[in-house]
Image (cartoon, rainbow, N blue to C red):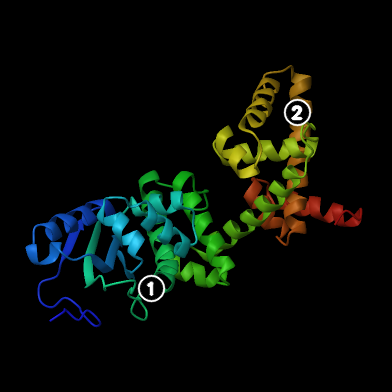
């Protein structure tokens, strides 16, 4: 009599693998499966995956046969791509998040049905239902751990991986329609930080559009060079990261950085001129943020300008009709 798999689930002992990483857990599951004569003749049909990152656990099912077969063969790439799509981040960011896992459990929930039939995830356990909020929760914990390790002081900007992951999840969550308050609640990150991140992403998008609209070979304008210098100041003078954020070649950023550094050791008169140019650049940046909806005080705080100075610039610009 043929085995009826229509509603088949494991009873009693679970066929599962545990490990710190996704690959380790899948490998241990494969070893367990292959060591059981009663199991090795069957294919994995549906997997339940539990991932714990800093105490935040997410449990979801995957039923796609090709992705499951790749995982059984030791290839986590298709599964990470699938997860990244539901998390709303790039596969590289998804990999960075999963690298922080403390425990992963991969369990075979159902055997592969015969023919072309495949399982569907149980209600509430699909990747689309679980992973978007899981990503927010995980990134929130990763940010807290990064802050603790780096001893980041309050009101100081995040850097590196923590900043990139927060930007990625805020972007995807905003696109899903979540408010700053909702994102803050799910991540544990202050609402003001979420708001500043969202506004920074909006500015970055506008800046990238401006640079991409530049005709090939055309030199950067004075205002565009000022934006490059400002971006370098927020990336620890990292030309590659600044170039990635602005969407321009890294060699262009390095050239601007080198000229800026050379000008800093010029004669006193030149240094005074440079300070004036930087002041004008900072003033333009403050006014730009105010046009985007920020208050003068908030814009000044982000750029390291005293609130009184920022408010004075804004007031003068309004009188002159520039705002």
- Looking at the picture, does residue 53 appear above or below residue 265? below
What element does badge 2 sit on? helix
Q: Residue at x 73, y 42 (%)?
A: 211
- Looking at the picture, does residue 291 appear above or below residue 59? above
Could you tell me residue 30's position as x and y percent?
18, 56
Q: Nearer the viewer, residue 153 or 170?
A: 170
Q: Residue at x 45, y 46 (%)?
A: 161
Q: Residues within 10 Å of mark 2 (few under 14, many from 20)?
A: some
**Left or right: where 167 falls relative to 226:** left
Residue matched to label 1: 126
Q: Residue at x 64, y 58 (%)?
A: 199
Q: Nearer the viewer, residue 292 or 310?
A: 292
**Left or right: where 287 falls relative to 53:** right
The answer to which quarter of the image holds residue 283 is top right
Q: Earlier in the sequence, mark 1 or mark 2?
A: 1
- Looking at the picture, does residue 260 appear above or below residue 314? above
Q: Nearer the viewer, residue 65 or 16?
A: 65
Residue matched to label 2: 274
Estimate the spatial distance between the alpha carbons at disc 1 and disc 2, rounded to whole Å.
Answer: 57 Å
Could you tell me residue 77's position as x and y percent?
37, 51
């Amino acid at each position: 009599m043929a085995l009826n798999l229509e509603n088949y689930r494991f009873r009693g002992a679970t066929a599962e693998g545990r490990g710190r990483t996704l690959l380790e857990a899948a490998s241990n599951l494969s070893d367990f499966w292959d060591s059981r004569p009663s199991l090795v003749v069957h294919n994995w049909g549906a997997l339940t995956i539990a991932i714990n990152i800093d105490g935040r656990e997410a449990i979801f099912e995957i039923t796609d046969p090709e992705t499951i077969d790749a995982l059984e063969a030791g290839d986590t790439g298709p599964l990470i791509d699938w997860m990244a799509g539901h998390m709303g981040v790039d596969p590289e960011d998804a990999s960075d998040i999963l690298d922080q896992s403390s425990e992963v459990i991969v369990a075979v929930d159902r055997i592969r049905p015969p023919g072309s039939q495949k399982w569907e995830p149980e209600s509430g356990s699909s990747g689309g239902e679980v992973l978007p909020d899981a990503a927010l929760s995980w990134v929130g914990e990763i940010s807290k751990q990064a802050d603790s390790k780096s001893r980041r002081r309050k009101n100081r900007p995040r850097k590196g991986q923590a900043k990139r992951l927060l930007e990625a999840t805020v972007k995807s969550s905003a696109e899903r329609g979540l408010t700053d308050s909702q994102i803050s609640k799910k991540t544990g990150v202050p609402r003001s930080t979420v708001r500043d991140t969202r506004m920074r992403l909006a500015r970055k998008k506008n800046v990238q559009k401006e640079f991409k609209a530049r005709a090939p070979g055309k030199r950067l304008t004075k205002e565009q060079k000022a934006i490059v210098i400002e971006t370098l100041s927020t990336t620890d003078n990292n030309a590659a990261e600044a170039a990635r954020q602005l969407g321009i070649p890294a060699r262009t950023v390095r050239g601007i950085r080198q000229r800026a550094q050379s000008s800093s050791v010029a004669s006193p008169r030149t240094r005074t001129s440079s300070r004036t140019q930087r002041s004008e650049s900072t003033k333009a940046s403050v006014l730009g943020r105010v046009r985007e909806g920020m208050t003068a005080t908030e814009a000044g705080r982000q750029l390291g300008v005293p609130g009184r100075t920022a408010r004075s610039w804004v007031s003068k610009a309004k009188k002159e009709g520039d705002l």
